[in-house]
Amino acid sequence: MERAKILVCVTGGIAAYKAPGIIRRLREANHEVRVAATKAAFRFIPEETLSIAAGGKVHTDETWWEESGRVEHVSLARWADLVLVAPATADSMARAAIGLGDDLVSSTVLAGAKKVLWASAMNPEMWANPATRRNVETLKGWGHRFVGPAEGLMASAEELPGFGRLAEEADIAAAAEEALGDTAR
Ligand SMILES: Cc1cc2nc3c(=O)[nH]c(=O)nc-3n(C[C@H](O)[C@H](O)[C@H](O)COP(=O)(O)O)c2cc1C
């Protein structure tokens, strides 16, 4: 597989604790991986854990404003062959679908990311909600790709099984390879 530049964007869902496994797998496949995270992601996974998985700094809303002489969302969007949002919250997809760019992750998606793959994870009612359905269709209409969510038990014991679980690591990695190999935008 050809070496590619992948920006993994971690957003604030329970499945954020699985992000290091995804990052490691992509790096093991010899891809160059950078990691960005939303403020909410750090409620679920420490920055240090993501940084170790990334083998470097995590791009955050803080680094976004610290970089002098560079506009980080533009440079990241140009750098990445693929932006993989994993896990992707309902919120992050909704913001992308209406063109918000109020943090580093949403701004990077907005700033012309070449290919975007959403690995969505949320409670099944959130995934089934008409607002989420509309947002997914909007993003698909722009050529964005989706992997999952998968069916099965949710992290919280309160939830009934349904479509909402983050797709398996191997399936996310396979979807990333497929997106990279696809000549369509
Ligand atoms: C305990 C807890 C768990 C959450 N889990 C999820 C989740 O799995 N998926 C999701 O879409 N939102 C989840 N949320 C809601 C998001 O954290 C919230 O929408 C947040 O604004 C997301 O921010 P971000 O998209 O900028 O990362 C959860 C919230 C809390 C408090």
Image (cartoon, helix red, strand yellow):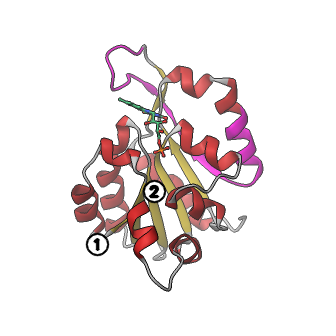
The percent coordinates of residue 118 (x first, y second) are 55, 48
The percent coordinates of residue 112 (x first, y second) are 67, 68
**Within the magenta stretch, is there residue 58?**
no
The percent coordinates of residue 175 (x first, y second) are 53, 53
**Within the magenta stretch, is there residue 154?**
yes
Query: Is 10 left or right of 103, judged from the image as shown?
Result: left
Instruction: Work out whether residue 144 can be spotted.
Output: yes
| Image quarter in which the C terminus is found | bottom right
Which residue is rendered at x = 30% and y = 41% of the image? 44
Q: Real-space Cα distance between discs 1 and 2?
A: 14 Å
Specify the quadrant of the image occupied by residue 128. top right
Q: Nearer the viewer, residue 42 or 135?
A: 42
Judging by the rendered image, the residue that carries numbered circle 1 is 56
Instruction: Work out whether residue 60 can be spotted.
Output: no
Q: Nearer the viewer, residue 109 or 60?
A: 60
Quarter holding ligand 1: top left
| Disc number for residue 9 | 2
Dot 1: element: loop
Q: Amino acid at mark 2?
A: Cys
Which residue is rendered at x = 43% and y = 52% of the image? 38
Q: Is residue 150 above or below residue 32?
A: above
The percent coordinates of residue 27 (x first, y second) are 34, 67
Q: Is residue 97 above or below residue 82?
A: above
| Disc number for residue 21 | none
Q: Amino acid at mark 1?
A: Gly
Neighbor class of circle 1 (other Cα within 10 Å; few <14, some 14-19, many 20+) is few
Pointer 1 residue Cβ closer than 8 Å to ligand 1: no
Specify the quadrant of the image occupied by residue 156. top left
What segment carries the magenta color?
134-159
Which residue is rendered at x = 51% and y = 22% of the image? 124
